[in-house]
Amino acid sequence: MDRARDRADPRRKSGMKIGLLGGSFNPAHKGHRRITLDAMRALDLDEVWWLVSPGNPLKDGAGDMAPFAARFASARKMARRAPIRASAIELELHTRYTLDTVRKIRRRYPGHAFIWLMGEDNLEQFHRWRGWRDIARAIPIAVIGRPGYNAAAHATPALGWFRRFQRRPGQAKNWTMWSLPAFVLLRFRPDPTSATSLRARDPDWFRHMGRNVP
């Protein structure tokens, strides 16, 4: 049995430090796993939840988006034997936007501390997210560097507002003490794996995955 996946309900615990990594996971791959484990070490996290999105508002209409069940199954498979929890909570909570998800998770799990994890490619378009300033006021954010996105991300309108709240990487482990808004930019050894390249190599990858969502 997968202990990372089947551990006790977090509502029975308290005081955990948890990273939230939202995404389509279309499919989940070793790059997701690697940056998650790197972020866990840098931020001193107990675990990370992969929030598999039922539908990304910025990717609506994407013709190559696999069914949710297949994407969730790929996330569970990639999360095995690690302190990573593949989560269908957005489907359960009927949330479509990150701000709503964050608020509902914090209400459901008031005893835990949460930090939002996102790639530098998401920082580039963060100003397009609904209520993006309110997201930054609601939860600390760790931005994980991605090759090729540095210049675009630093030119984004969001960073023009957000830059004054940036923390140094050396302060990353103290994120539970930050006043909000606050974010840190973390850079790790890059992983070349991408969901786009995996889909190009195997457009029917999702047909190999299980169809059941717990």
Image (cartoon, rainbow, N blue to C red):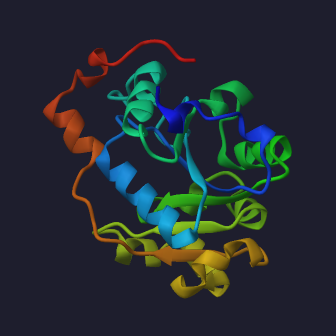
Q: Nearer the viewer, residue 62 or 10?
A: 10
Residue 176, by quadrant, is: bottom right
Q: Is residue 10 left or right of residue 49?
A: right
Q: Nearer the viewer, residue 193 or 12?
A: 12
Identify which residue is drawn at 26% across, 42% down. 196
Q: Is residue 145 left or right of residue 133?
A: left
174 over 58 or under it: above or below = below
Q: Nearer the viewer, residue 136 or 45?
A: 45
Percent across and percent down for residue 110 are: 85, 50
Percent across and percent down for residue 60 are: 49, 33
115 over 180 or under it: above or below = above
Q: Is residue 145 visible?
A: yes
Percent across and percent down for residue 159 are: 56, 76
Identify which residue is drawn at 38% across, 30% down. 74
Identify which residue is drawn at 43% across, 58% down. 37
Q: Is residue 53 left or right of residue 103?
A: left
Q: Is residue 155 visible?
A: no
Residue 207, by quadrant, is: top left
3 over 206 or under it: above or below = below
Q: Is residue 111 left or right of residue 144?
A: right
**Could you tell me which quadrant the C terminus lies in?**
top right
Identify which residue is drawn at 36% across, 77% down. 151
208 over 12 or under it: above or below = above
Q: Residue furthest left?
A: 201
Percent across and percent down for residue 84 are: 51, 45
Number of numbered discs present? 0
Residue 34, by quadrant, is: bottom left
